[in-house]
Image: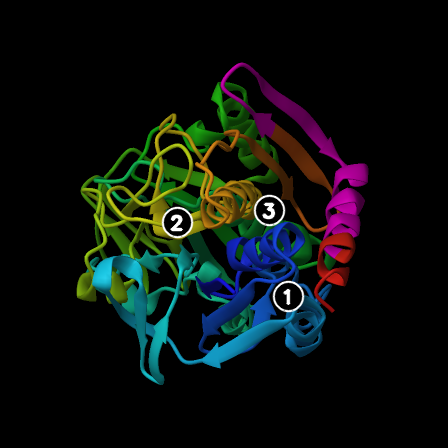
Amino acid sequence: MNAVTIVGSGFAALTAVRKLRAAGPGLEITLVAPRPQFSYLPGTIWIPSGLRRPEDLLIPLDNFFQRMGVNYHQGPATGLRHGGRTLLTDNGEIPNDGLIIASGGRFLKKLPGIEHAIIPCEGIPAAVRIRDRLKEMQGGAIAVGFSGNPREPSAMRGGPMFEFLFGIDRQLRLEGRRHRFRLIFFTPGTEPGKRLGPKAVAGLLREMEARGIETRLGHKLKRFDEDKVVTEGGEFEADLILFMPGMTGNQWFDNSELPRSEGGLIRADPYCRVEGMERVYVAGDSGSFPGPAWMPKQAHMADLQAKAAAANLAAELKGGAPAKTFRVELVCIIDGRDSGMLVARTPKRNLVLPRMRLFHWIKRLYEWWYLRQYR
């Protein structure tokens, strides 16, 4: 019986479990993660407004593991040895015949004063902090922004920041206190949302203007103070700072033979196979993949890569060769609490549909559909 180890418990990891089990009923699958739970991060945009509670988005995986016949190994990965055949954890070593790394990325926190900002995609506790701060505030300036990893163009996640921005604007309006707040969007780039496609940039800027959201674009960030954002183009007050930095690889990658990109992610080929390693694959935020610079770091892309990685590893374990690639596709609904804008991008097309209430409900319906397979 072949033994496969999967590192992580996010989108890519759980998709890999499902696809591997379907491809190989007799496989021994071990999943390694600090906790046996799945955090549905896309839903955290609704925690500040109360549309979601933390417990709505944190899914225990015990039932899923039992249904899938998965051995759960508790503890973080700490390194890799023997060409990928031995995974090191703080709870022992795990040998394998095949490995899929889906442990996500790590946020770059080198900007001075970043401790004064909340990083929303760090998880559910961060969204709870935003919720509580908004309840406490009687007025003031709220700054929302993001940046990237200059050495890894794809290692950026700006979409959720637009959702927090528009969601907070709408929430304050419904509460009748928007007039007491300044909302400021900032980023070092001059075209916010460029990775979503050229049509999206104009749409996002129009949306900000219509909502009375100020913009500070095109200036490199210097630091955060407790009550301000400082850039090379000047500074502005901020009583609450929400910021999404660029991403790099997990720290445990340093204790391994894994090939790394300039930006610190794991180098992969078009089949999601780690370059130069046998039966070692990567999916999601951990990997640096060939493709366009706008290739997204989002759940949908992680799922597509995990499907390819699982199919190719299963083929190798049966004596075949990797043959499945993944399509590069960005699909998202930029939600604003009770309406949303649909954005889709492929190498050939870019679609942007204006804000509608229907898209908000589609996003909520998708969340229900997606989570039911893990409950």
Q: Answer yes or no: is residue 226 visible.
A: no
Label 1 Cα neighbours within 10 Å, binned few <14 / some 14-19 / many ≥20: many
Nearer mark to the viewer, of 1 and 2: 2
Magenta residue span: 344-367
Q: Position of residue 131 (x, y in %)?
A: 58, 70
Nearer the observer, 144 or 197: 197
- Judged from this view, the residue extending furthest toward the bottom is 91
User: What's the CA distance linking mark 2 and mark 3?
Assistant: 37 Å
The structure residue drawn at horizontal position 38% and vertical position 25%, both measured from the top left corner, is: 292
Q: CA distance from mark 1 to mark 3?
A: 14 Å
Label number found at residue 211: none
**What kind of element bears circle 2?**
strand
Q: Earlier in the sequence, mark 1 or mark 3?
A: 1
Which residue, given by chain and number where applicable, does mark 2 sit on? 281
Q: Is residue 129 visible?
A: yes
Q: Hey, what amino acid is under mark 3?
A: Phe
State the residue position of label 3. Answer: 166
Q: Residues within 10 Å of mark 2 (few under 14, many from 20)?
A: many
Report the front residue among 125 and 295.
Answer: 295
